[in-house]
Image: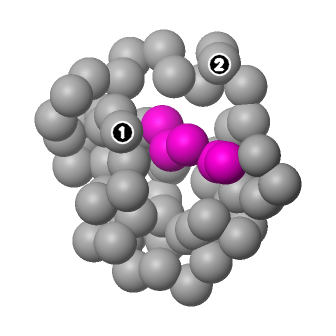
């Protein structure tokens, strides 16, 4: 996420493959990985959540660059 104030709910800021989880840690300021249940899409999971809400559902995070 290269933007200084990214919208974490923007699916264009995410990758949907495992290579995108490189560098993920258990704490940090940016979400790194979320679980998308079967039958759902990334858009439906992230929806219009705030950055704080996306961080809450993130199971891994990345540190600030």
Q: Nearer the viewer, residue 65 or 22?
A: 22
* Position in image of residue 13 (x %, y %): 63, 53
* Secondary structure of the residue carrying numbered label 2: helix
Residue 25 in magenta stretch: no
- The kind of secondary structure the magenta stretch mainly shows is loop
N-terminal of the two: label 1 or label 2? 2
Q: Which residues are magenta?
A: 33-37
Identify the residue at horizontal 31%, vertical 58% (top origin).
55
Q: Is residue 14 above or below residue 65?
A: below
Most distant residue in the front direction? 38
* Position in image of residue 39 (x %, y %): 83, 54
Identify the residue at horizontal 58%, vertical 68% (top origin).
46
The image's mark for residue 59 is 1
Which residue is labeled 2 in the image? Answer: 18
Q: Nearer the viewer, residue 30 or 18?
A: 18
Residue 65 in sight in this render: no
* Secondary structure of the residue carrying numbered label 1: loop
Specify the quadrant of the image occupied by residue 56. Answer: bottom left
Q: Is residue 24 above or below residue 2?
A: above
- Quarter holding the C terminus? top left
Q: Crowding near pointer 2: few (<14 within 10 Å), some, many (20+)?
A: few
Specify the quadrant of the image occupied by residue 26. Answer: top left
Q: Is residue 15 left or right of residue 64?
A: right
* Position in image of residue 40 (x %, y %): 77, 59
What is the basis of the colouring in this image? one colour
Identify the residue at horizontal 62%, vertical 77% (top origin).
47
């Amino acid at each position: 996420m290269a933007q200084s104030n990214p919208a974490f709910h923007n699916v264009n800021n995410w990758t949907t493959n495992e290579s995108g989880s490189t560098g993920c840690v258990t704490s940090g300021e940016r979400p790194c990985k979320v679980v998308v249940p079967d039958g759902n899409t990334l858009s439906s999971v992230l929806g219009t959540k705030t950055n704080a809400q996306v961080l809450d559902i993130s199971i891994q995070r990345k540190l600030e660059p």
